[in-house]
Amino acid sequence: MLKNKLRNYHLVLASGSPRRQQFFKDLDLDFEIRLKDIEEIYPLELKAEEITNYLAELKANAFEGELQANEILITSDTIVWHNNKALGKPKDEQDAFTILKSLSNATHEVITSVCFKTNSETKLLHEITKVTFNELSEDAIRYYIENYKPFDKAGAYGIQEWIGFVGVSKIEGSYANVMGMPTDKVYEYLNNLV
């Protein structure tokens, strides 16, 4: 369906995330992975989706002048927004513990921005999903960190893992977005391109 509509385009996913790559496979899209090392630093005055918009565009701008006429570059960034601050990937076990303890018995937002760049234009979209955790015991948090090592995940957790099954009591919005990509919005955007 969409693959056929996009046959004259070449999709480039600039993400090393196995989850995002799997989403594109699951959407039945042909794509190439191209990676660049980007220092993900943003101005401290930015809040919520301003942060993810800035970082998704920063990642896309690293490819400025390199895209072919038929290429669509897709970059994205996800943060957990809680208590008016961004929670990125944990630095170590203690940081992961502190983050998960703060999410326990509370609602936070998972925000993902996606940037679509061609050699003529740049478009951004974002999605916000609210996630509520039950109270997590210290033992449960330690068990999760030791067994699942969530150091590559914003907010120190993967909703598709053990902690999501036992800890999450409510989701408002896109489940896929919590895993790092609002697939319905990405599909819709690409579908409306042609």
Image (cartoon, helix red, strand yellow):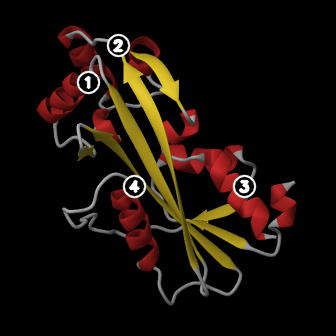
Of 133 and 163, the residue lying toward us? 133
Going from N to C along the chain, the mark reached first, 1 or 4, is 4
Amino acid on which disc 3 is placed: Glu
Instruction: State the separation of the CA atoms marked 3 and 4.
Output: 20 Å
Observer-side mark, 1 or 3, equals 3
Q: Is residue 107 above or below residue 192?
A: above
The percent coordinates of residue 24 (x first, y second) are 65, 51
Please report the residue visible at 59 percent of the width from the left and 86 percent of the height from the top: 119
Provide the residue designation for mark 4.
49
Provide the residue designation for mark 3.
188
Whether pointer 1 and pointer 4 mark residues with C-beta atoms closer than 8 Å, the reply is no
Going from N to C along the chain, the mark reached first, 1 or 3, is 1
Instruction: State the separation of the CA atoms marked 2 and 1.
Output: 17 Å
Please report the residue visible at 62 percent of the width from the left and 65 percent of the height from the top: 32
Specify whether 135 is left or right of 162.
left
Provide the residue designation for mark 1.
145
Please report the residue visible at 57 percent of the width from the left and 50 percent of the height from the top: 21
Observer-side mark, 3 or 4, equals 4
Position of the N terminus by quadrant: bottom right
Q: Residues within 10 Å of mark 3 (few under 14, many from 20)?
A: few
Regarding residue 152, the answer to whether it shows in the image is no
Q: Secondary structure at mark 1?
A: helix
Q: Residues within 10 Å of mark 2 (few under 14, many from 20)?
A: some
Instruction: State the separation of the CA atoms marked 4 and 2.
Output: 25 Å
The percent coordinates of residue 63 (x first, y second) are 47, 80
Whether pointer 2 and pointer 1 mark residues with C-beta atoms closer than 8 Å, the reply is no
Going from N to C along the chain, the mark reached first, 3 or 4, is 4
Observer-side mark, 2 or 1, equals 2
Of 70 and 107, the residue lying toward us? 107
Residue 3: quarter of image: bottom right
Give me the disc on residue 134. 2
Instruction: State the separation of the CA atoms marked 1 and 3.
Output: 36 Å
